[in-house]
Image: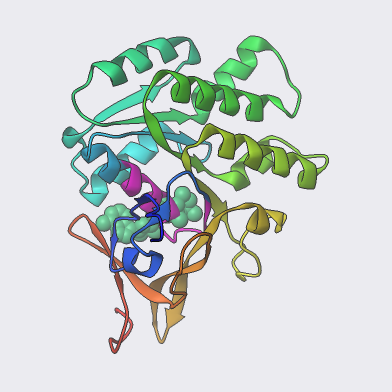
Amino acid sequence: MVEQIERVKTYIQGFDDALQGGIPKGHVVLISGTAGSMKSSISFNILFQEAKAGKTGLYISLEQSYESLYKHILNMGLNLNLINIEHIDDLGRIGEVVNGTKASDKGTIIVADMGCIRKEIKDIRIGDNKSWLNVIKNIVKKIKAETHCENFVLDSLSALYTLSRFEDPRVELFYIFEFLRDMGLTTFLISEMPLDCSKYSEYEIEDFLSDGIIYVRLTPFRRNVVREISVVKMRATACNNDVYSLEFKNGQFQALYGGQNPLL
Ligand SMILES: Nc1ncnc2c1ncn2[C@@H]1O[C@H](COP(=O)(O)OP(=O)(O)OP(=O)(O)O)[C@@H](O)[C@H]1O
Ligand SMILES: [Mg+2]
C-alpha cells in the first residue's frame, strides 16, 4: 500500500483536488505571481485557516508593514477573532510572543514585519548584506524551537534580495533552501514575477530548489482582467496542471474549471 503523505491544504476550494488534497508537509513552495495577484492573501489565508484548526504559523513580511497587512486581511473579511495573532514588533519581545502563543487556547499566527528586523539590525550595528538573512533565520529557529509552529510564509523572496545582496546566488540559495528544509516547516516563499511573466523567480534556480511552484496571475480577457492559478510543479504529488480561474468571495478562495467562462 502507498504510504499516505500528510498534506497542508491551500484552502482554495476546488484547487486542493489538483494537488491530491494539498501540499506535502515540510515542502518548500514558491508562490509566484505578478503584482496584485493575491500572493500574500492566499498565503496568509492558509496560515489563518490552519490557525482556526489550532495550529501555529509564522508570517515574515519584508514588503508590507504589520498595519498594512492587518488592514488588508480585515478588508478581506477574515474574522481574526477566531485565532490568536501575535506581532513581533521588537525582537527583544520574542519571549512574550512565544508565551502568548503557548498561553492561547486558539491557533496562532505570529507576524514579524520589516520594522522589527530593521530595528534589530540597527541595534546590533552590523550593516553587512547578510544581516537581514541572519535575523530572519534566527526568528524562524527561535519560533520553531519554542512553539509548535508548522507553517512559515516569507513575503517575499524578492524583497529579501533587495535588502540582502547575494554575491553568489546559486550557492547562497542552496543553503537557504537547505536551512528551510532542515527546519521541517511547510514553507511558502512568495516570489514577485516580472510583468511579462518571463520567469517564476529572480535567479531561476529557486524553481529547481523548491519542492513546488504555484503560479498566480492577472490575465486580460477582453476588457476585463481575470485571476488565474495553476500548479507548475509539486514533488510527491500527481498534480493537475490545468489553469483555473481564481475567485475570492465571502471570505473564501475558489478555483473554477471546466466548461465555465472565465469569471468576469
Ligand atoms: N475582498 C477583497 N479584499 C481586499 N482585496 C481584495 C479583495 N478581493 C480582491 N482583492 C485584491 O487583492 C489584491 C491584493 O492582494 P495581495 O496583497 O494579496 O496581492 P499580492 O500579490 O501579494 O500583491 P503585491 O504584489 O502588492 O504584494 C488587490 O489588488 C485587491 O484588489
Ligand atoms: Mg504581497
Horizontally, residue 21 falls left or right of residue 174, namely: left
Q: Residue 212 at what x, y percent from top left? A: 53, 58
Please tell me whether residue 212 is drawn above or below residue 60 in the rendered image.
below
Given residues 238 and 144, the one toward you in this image is 238
User: Residue extending furthest bottom?
Assistant: 259
Horizontally, residue 28 falls left or right of residue 258, namely: right
At 29% from the left edge and 18% from the top edge, which residue is drawn? 102
In the image, is residue 9 part of the stretch drawn in magenta?
A: no
Q: Quadrant of the C terminus?
A: bottom left
Q: Residue 107 at what x, y percent from top left? A: 25, 31
Q: Residue 15 at what x, y percent from top left? A: 34, 67
At 43% from the left edge and 46% from the top edge, which residue is drawn? 25
User: Residue extending furthest front?
Assistant: 1
Magenta residues span 29-47
Given residues 85 and 10, the one toward you in this image is 10
Q: Residue 19: which quarter of the image?
A: bottom left
